[in-house]
Image (tube, grey):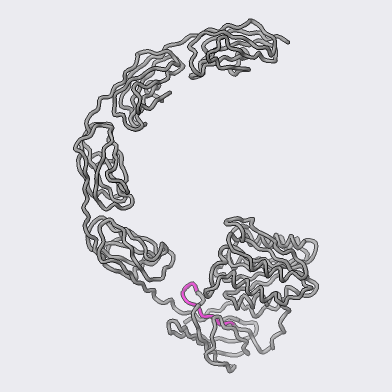
């Protein structure tokens, strides 16, 4: 056993936050979700509510007190801070009622809550005291120490006392201690209801009488493991030495006032029936805490599962074990790496995936450090795996494939190059048969049953036969026109006909499903292009050239009009849907006014309001091509 000294002792605190002449005080209470954590089976928020109710039951009415709470209304919010009771005399009943109504929920804006309380107290104008009770690390303000330092520098006799309730994180403890030290306050910790009561009383009550010079307050704690967790099962103590003390004292921690001298402490850990002993010296100004550390007992576990299970099935596995973070249940061949696993935190029993290969396997309870502490054997039995499908299928067609197999999550049927990459797949879950798309290229392929997206456990051949592919279209077409394109091909989902730059990107397309021929709009710019039959939106199976010929147009308008007047414009041209007329300044790419022509001829435009030289333009909507222009002079009205 080891004797480990520390320097923290709640009983050694004597400063009162409510001394005469300091009426401005706010209690800041942690209302974050972590306050639902339990100590000895009781939620921390419940403990805090009971301690505060007892503490304020006979609180002097003339002393001023307020209440600020954080993290009690909104999840994940760093602004969930509320001063529920403003600081004033006689507020103890209101504070008790408000504390009892708290339902912990959100984050831990601990530092910003202290700042909000300080501002409520007008800390820059008069003396102010804040009492912070928190159980966790700051989650919002990046630098609690710097914030506390600024409060102290700006305040008039500003003080923050801090009680860390059930806090073991060293970083959180350091943050809390820094807030207290930077503002000249007390920092106390409490790990249970009794210690919280003592800590709160040490702050809000009048100073305790000075102890007799010959007595020193000592705290005895029994801890376990490398992380020095306080033992939460009964601990009996025997203290022998300079002073006569009763035998078989209980409590953990145990607090005693002892005369100076030499002593021996014995702690009996009743749950494992092990005793630990430490010698220590009591002297004023020396160490005030004695820790007796016990070794971590070796963890044990059990596994309860069926003796057999079909290959690829899921099996319920019951377990009894530590259930620490990352503990898991595995299945694997004896002496080999696991095949599948699931965390114990997922439930009890857990659902565990069985391998696809029959054989004798081992179930394992594995700790987070990969240590196996329990095993049980299970026999994985064979499952028939079959694929039912035609021997041949047309290129690009969709066929139905029947199957039998494990039917595990992620099982799928694929068609693939023999020994190579798959072309398409379909998951089997809740579908039998499945619909499977064939490739566009004829040849010999293989159908596969794939276990959990990763392991091929059955293949069978299939021949994909050729399908004629052609396009029936004119050799030329006017720019911007709609052309009827006949086609022959796989007619698969996503098949389409395109017009494109030769060897380049497509310009327009139409899906063919249900339509033969399809109407395809030609580009607005004359030139040589190509028509394409594209398979499933991805693979071009056929091309043929097409020449887009120019189209002409003419516009007729008055030579001049007054600014703002209506301008009748006659026109002659292709009249495609989307074609329009514009008035624009000479040499300007934009326009001043426009109108779609539709069936109106002449169409009507509105002259610009600014006199000058303009032109009327016929614009083909496809590719925004200007087909004709005529000059227009706009005069002053």
Q: Height in image: 543 above or below 342?
A: above
Residue 541: x and y, percent?
30, 27
Task: Look at 76% across and 63% down and name the residue there.
Answer: 121
Q: Identify the image quadrant of residue 618.
A: top right
Q: Identify the image quadrant of residue 530.
A: top left
Q: Identify the image quadrant of residue 108.
A: bottom right
In magenta stretch: residue 221 = yes
Query: Majority secondary structure of the magenta segment?
Result: strand
Q: Nearer the viewer, residue 213 or 90?
A: 90
Q: Nearer the viewer, residue 529 or 556?
A: 556
Q: Height in image: 571 above or below 439?
A: above
Residue closest to the far bottom: 244
Count of marks overlaid on the render: 0
Left of 19 or right of it: where is 176?
A: left
Task: Look at 38% across and 27% down and name the residue there.
Answer: 511
**Residue 160 seen from this side:** no
Residue 291: x and y, percent?
53, 80
Quarter containing the C terminus: top right
In magenta stretch: residue 74 = no
Q: Which residues are magenta?
A: 219-228
Left of 358 or right of it: where is 574?
A: right
């Amino acid at each position: 056993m080891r004797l480990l000294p520390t320097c923290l002792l709640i009983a050694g605190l004597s400063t009162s936050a409510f001394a005469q002449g300091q009426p401005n005080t706010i209690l800041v209470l942690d209302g974050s979700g972590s306050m639902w954590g339990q100590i000895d089976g009781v939620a921390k928020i419940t403990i805090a509510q009971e301690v505060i109710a007892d503490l304020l039951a006979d609180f002097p009415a003339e002393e001023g007190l307020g209440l600020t709470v954080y993290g009690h209304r909104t999840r994940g919010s760093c602004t969930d801070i509320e001063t529920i009771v403003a600081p004033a005399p006689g507020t103890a009943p209101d504070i008790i009622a408000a504390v009892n109504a708290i339902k912990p929920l959100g984050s831990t804006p601990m530092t910003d809550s202290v700042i909000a309380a300080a501002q409520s107290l007008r800390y820059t104008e008069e003396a102010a005291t804040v009492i912070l009770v928190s159980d966790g690390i700051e989650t919002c303000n990046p630098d609690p120490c710097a914030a506390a330092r600024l409060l102290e520098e700006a305040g008039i006799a500003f003080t923050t006392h801090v009680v860390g309730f059930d806090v073991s994180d060293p970083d959180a403890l350091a943050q809390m201690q820094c807030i207290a030290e930077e503002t000249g306050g007390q920092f106390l910790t409490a790990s249970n209801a009794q210690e919280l009561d003592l800590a709160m009383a040490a702050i809000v009550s009048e100073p305790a009488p000075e102890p007799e010079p010959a007595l020193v307050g000592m705290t005895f704690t029994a801890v376990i493991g490398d992380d020095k967790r306080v033992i939460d099962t009964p601990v009996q103590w025997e203290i022998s030495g300079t002073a006569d003390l009763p035998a078989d004292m209980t409590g953990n921690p145990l607090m005693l006032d002892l005369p100076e001298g030499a002593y021996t402490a014995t702690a009996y850990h009743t749950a494992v029936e092990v005793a630990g002993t430490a010698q220590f010296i009591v002297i004023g100004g020396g160490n005030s805490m004695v820790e007796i550390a016990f070794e971590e007992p070796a963890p044990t576990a059990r596994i309860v599962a069926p003796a057999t299970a079909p290959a690829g099935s899921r099996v319920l596995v019951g377990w009894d074990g530590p259930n620490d973070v990352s503990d898991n249940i595995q299945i694997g061949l004896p002496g080999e790496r696991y095949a599948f696993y699931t965390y114990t935190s997922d439930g009890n029993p857990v659902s565990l995936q069985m391998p696809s290969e029959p054989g004798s396997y081992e179930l394992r309870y594995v700790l987070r450090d990969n240590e196996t502490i329990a095993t049980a054997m299970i026999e994985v039995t064979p499952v028939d795996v079959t694929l039912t499908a035609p021997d041949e299928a047309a290129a690009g067609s969709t066929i139905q494939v029947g199957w039998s197999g494990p039917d595990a999550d992620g099982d799928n049927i694929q068609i693939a190059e023999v020994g190579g990459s798959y072309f398409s797949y379909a998951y089997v879950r809740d579908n039998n048969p499945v619909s499977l798309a064939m490739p566009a290229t004829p040849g010999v392929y293989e159908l596969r049953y794939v276990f959990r997206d990763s392991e091929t456990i059955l293949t069978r051949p299939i021949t994909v036969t050729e399908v004629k592919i052609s396009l029936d279209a004119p050799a030329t077409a006017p720019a911007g026109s709609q052309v009827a394109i006949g086609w022959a091909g796989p007619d698969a989902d996503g098949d389409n006909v395109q017009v494109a730059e030769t060897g380049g990107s497509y310009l327009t397309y139409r899906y063919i499903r249900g339509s033969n021929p399809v109407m395809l709009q030609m580009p607005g710019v004359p030139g040589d292009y190509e028509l394409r039959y594209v398979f499933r939106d991805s693979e071009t199976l056929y091309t043929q050239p097409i020449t887009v010929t120019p189209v002409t147009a003419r516009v007729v308008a008055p030579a001049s009009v007054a600014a703002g007047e209506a301008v009748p414009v006659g026109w002659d041209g292709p009249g495609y849907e989307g074609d329009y007329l514009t008035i624009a300044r000479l040499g300007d790419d934009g326009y001043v006014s426009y109108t779609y022509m539709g069936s109106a001829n002449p169409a009507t435009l509105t002259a610009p309001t600014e006199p000058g030289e303009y032109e009327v333009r016929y614009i083909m909507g496809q590719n925004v091509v200007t087909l004709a222009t005529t000059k227009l002079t706009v005069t002053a009205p």
